[in-house]
Amino acid sequence: MATLAIKEIKVSQTKGIIATKLDQVNRAFNISRKVVLTTTDNGANYVAAFSNYGSGIGEAEEDATNPDVEEVINSPEDQEREGLDIISVTMALAAAAAVQDSPRLPKHQRCRQVKAKFI
């Protein structure tokens, strides 16, 4: 485990601000696709940042579905094709553009040292 960067956040530490700052550090060092896990303290805003912007959650393992692509076109013919969801191209492109603009974080691991301190 190593410390890569220290950034002072002078505004309210919301989940969006935290995710953006962490993503900026990863991009600045050109390691966005190389980092597989980030360890932080157990603060609610850190947990929320990784829940909303993380590629996966280390402890909860939630399904990473995209809420922007919820409209599925279902006709009787489509229902016969099991496991196949058809979405509109416009919706898919809009969702892809939204994903590119939002911060991306790796999986999250809560610091066990901080957790042990409160026991």
Image: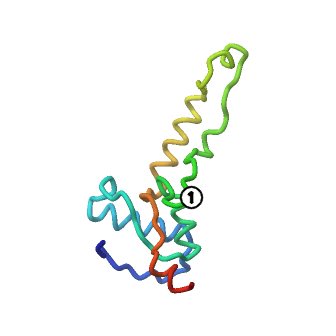
Instruction: Please state which amino acid type lies under the numbered disc 1.
Output: Ala
Farthest-out residue, right: 76
In this view, the residue in front, 84 or 97, is 84
Q: Which residue is drawn at 48% across and 81% down?
A: 114
Q: Residue at x 32, y 53 (%)?
A: 33
Question: Dividing the image into 4 quarters, which one contains the C terminus?
Answer: bottom right
Q: Which residue is drawn at 48% across and 77% down?
A: 41
Mark 1: which secondary structure?
loop
In this view, the residue in front, 56 or 32, is 56
Residue 7 image offset from top left, x and y in percent: 38, 79
Farthest-out residue, left: 29
Does 105 sit above or below residue 43? above
Task: Give the color scheme: rainbow, by chain, secondary structure or one colour.
Answer: rainbow
Residue 8 image offset from top left, x and y in percent: 41, 82
10 Å crowding of disc 1: few (<14), some (14-19), many (20+)? few
The image quarter in which residue 5 lies: bottom left
The image quarter in which residue 23 lies: bottom left
Farthest-out residue, front: 119
Query: How many badges with numbers are in the image?
Result: 1
Answer with left or right where residue 57 lies relative to residue 26.
Answer: right
Question: Dividing the image into 4 quarters, which one contains the N terminus?
Answer: bottom left
Answer with left or right where residue 3 lies relative to residue 78.
Answer: left
Q: Name the residue under label 1.
A: 60
Residue 17 image offset from top left, x and y in percent: 50, 70
Does 2 sit above or below residue 104? below
